[in-house]
Image (spheres, grey):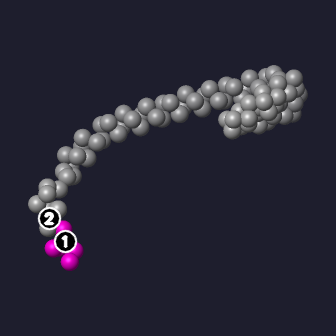
Amino acid sequence: MENKREHAHDIAEEGLDKLIEGNKDTGEKLTDQAKKIDPKGVEELAEEVERDKQNAERFVNKARSSASAFVPRLRAAAPLPSQNQLDLVPLVIG
């Protein structure tokens, strides 16, 4: 029984890949085929995708929050050079 579920999961995963690639007909056909084999295998994949989506959203939100907090500190620690300082660069390099 477990083997059937894994097989359905794998086919549904392949169908999802096809949908992502833009091949809607093949993706839907594979998903329907997987549902006929074992609907629970397809449901497991749907739950995995939803869990991955939520994790990705949390990661993005955390990264945005961290970046928002870090940028002002970065600017304070390393102020941009003034035009006078930039004019001296060729003297140092040359």
Q: Which mark is residue 44?
A: none
Range of residues picked out in magenta: 89-94
Q: Residue at x 19, y 46 (%)?
A: 76
**Is 24 left or right of 50, judged from the image as shown?**
right
Q: Residue at x 87, y 23 (%)?
A: 36
Taken as a whole, is the magenta stretch helix, strand or loop? helix
Give whichever of 40, 22 is nearer the camera: 22
Q: From the top left corner, tell me how far across and down residue 30 is, in percent.
A: 81, 31
- Quarter of the image where the N terminus is located: top right
Q: Are marks 1 and 2 in contact (CB under 8 Å)?
A: yes
Q: Could you tell me if residue 16 is visible in this image?
A: no
CA–CA distance in space, label 1 to label 2: 7 Å
Vertical arrangement, residue 22 with respect to residue 87, above or below: above
Q: For the residue marked with disc 1, what is the amino acid?
A: Pro
Q: Which residue is mark 1?
A: 90
Q: Residue at x 79, y 36 (%)?
A: 10
Instruction: Characterize the local packing of mark 1: few (<14), some (14-19) or many (20 or more) Cα atoms within 10 angstroms.
Output: few
Give whichever of 33, 84 is nearer the camera: 84
Q: From the top left corner, tell me how far across and down residue 12 is, in percent.
A: 77, 31
Q: Which mark is residue 87?
A: 2
Does the magenta segment cover residue 77? no
Task: Give the structural element (helix, strand or loop) at label 1.
Answer: helix
Instruction: Characterize the local packing of mark 2: few (<14), some (14-19) or many (20 or more) Cα atoms within 10 angstroms.
Output: few
Q: For the residue marked with disc 2, what is the amino acid?
A: Asp
Vertical arrangement, residue 26 with respect to residue 84, above or below: above
Q: From the top left corner, tell me how far across and down residue 32 is, in percent.
A: 82, 24
Residue found at the very far left of the displayed protein:
84
